[in-house]
Amino acid sequence: MGLFTKKPMHLLLEEAGDSGKGLKRTLSAGALVALGVGAIIGAGLFVRTAAAAAQNAGPSVTIGFIIAAIGCALAGLCYAELSSSIPISGSAYTYTYATMGELMAWIIGWDLVLEYAVGAATVGIAWSEYLNKLLVEVLHISPIPYQWCHSPFQSHPDGTVNGIMNLPALFIVVLLSLLLIKGTSESAFVNGVIVITKVAIVILIIVLGWGFIHEANHHPYIPVATKYIDQAGISHNYGGFWGVIGAAGTVFFAFIGFDAVSTAAQETKNPKTAMPIGILGSLAVCTVLYILFAHVLTGIAPVEFFRTKGGEASVVAAISEYMTGYGWLAKLVTVAILAGFSSVILVMLLGQSRVFYSMSKDGLLPKMFSDLHPKFKTPYKANLVILVIVGLFAAFIPGDVVGDMTSIGTLFAFMLVCIAVIILRKTDPDLPRQFRTPWVPLIPILGVAACGLMILGLGWTNWLRLFGWLALGFIIYFGYSKKNSHLKDSK
């Protein structure tokens, strides 16, 4: 069997059929939109917006959001066609297997670990930081001791205490993993409650904050191109064309998650119509909220504030300092951030377990990853293994180690999904498509170009990290996956 042998379409469609042995179909189109919004609105909106304004684009971070949204929308149209045509768990991994062959499918499956597992651990670490803010600023009680909410590689700024392990980050990963094992519909219900809460608070910030916008903070809207060196000594393109592109790559993290909707295709009641609604609907809702939120945030406080006083908690700090009389809103935002982070972790863990489920069904990973719980019909062993991997990362590794790896991994996946649409139109033109991407191949080509441009904005160091990660993946593929692939038995 060759490295580029494709998985036959008839096998994929057979797996999509409803059977007592498969995953339970419990999700509606509305639940998918909530799932997507739950994944998207979180760390990106509350943290990356201020970071992109400070490091890259100032008030023109809104343009960065628009560029990132365009790239996501182009990829989203391609995701919608593929997920409605091939309603199987696995997302980009499955689509690539059907169009570009096994080796490319393995590459994208391995690449998605960066998006889901590493991303979940990173957000778990951020959740831990904001839990302490909740304890101190909202509940007015003592924070968790430094050594129990930081990794052993971190030490207190005054040098008196070293971290031991990040217990809160480990706790939230364990809790949400157990919730996923209990069932997808239960997880979707909890996520739906969280989504309603945090979207309401985001709208409150936009409406109430609009009256506190100072026009001087929006001038010049696109700063003159210069270099900005952050506190870690890293140089960033600030202002001008590349500043805006750099901001797009930075805030792209804020859009990660809508593609996780496609990983739940096999658990959706009517995937042919629900998947396009879930993917594009969640993306549309979040794009509008993001642009308005960024406009308000950069209008309330000057860029220098985000570089100094603001830091990671810039949203809360800006409300406290510049929106007089709205201290209660700052407290609500702290709660919303915790809720937002929780739903992001939930959907990322869901996405990772479903990708591993699909890869295991194909023999590229051990069989245990596709074993379903006898009662709950969820891939519980995959969830438990991912719990251990993500939990260890969250408990013992600093959050800044990941950097922009999550973004670059996802952008790479989006590019392959766009290419898959073009290939599948040629190789299988008669495949029933409930949703058809318009103007093929123009839309997919523009999607590849937009995502490629954002990757350029992330810098060459992230390319090196991506290549190193893929090299590790090749070792696993040629050492295990190629020998155990089920595809060679179906030939």
Image: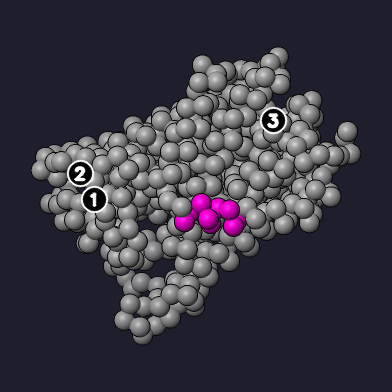
* Image quarter of the N terminus: top right
Secondary structure at badge 2 equals loop
- Foreground: disc 3 or disc 1: 1
User: Which residue is depicted at the point 69% across and 48% down?
Assistant: 356
Mark drawn on residue 223: 2
Task: Determine which of the numbered discs, if any, sits on residue 138 in the image.
Answer: none
Return the x and y of residue 349 as percentages of the image width and height. Answer: 58, 50
The front one of 387 and 101 is 101
Q: Which residue is mark 1?
A: 226
Q: State the CA–CA distance, disc 1 to disc 2.
A: 8 Å
Which residue corresponds to the image point at 54% horizontal and 36% vertical from the top-left?
A: 415
User: Which of the marked residues, 3 or 1, is nearer the chain's N terminus?
Assistant: 3
Q: Amino acid at mark 2?
A: Pro
For the residue labelled by badge 1, is the local secondary structure a helix, a strand or a loop?
A: strand
Mark 3 lies on a secondary structure that is helix
Question: In the rendered structure, are the residues bearing label 1 and label 2 in contact, judged by CB atoms less than 8 Å apart?
Answer: yes
Q: Is residue 442 above or below residue 12?
A: above
The residue tagged 3 is: 99
Q: Which span is picked out in magenta?
A: 461-469
Above or below, 392 relative to 27: below
- Foreground residue, 11 or 455? 455
- Quadrant of the rendered structure where residue 159 is? bottom left
**What is the three-letter code of the residue carrying label 1?**
Thr
Relative side of 357 to 252, left or right: right
Point out residue 488 in the picture as x, y percentages from the top left corner: 86, 39
Residue 214: x and y in percent read 11, 43
Q: Residues within 10 Å of mark 2 (few under 14, many from 20)?
A: some
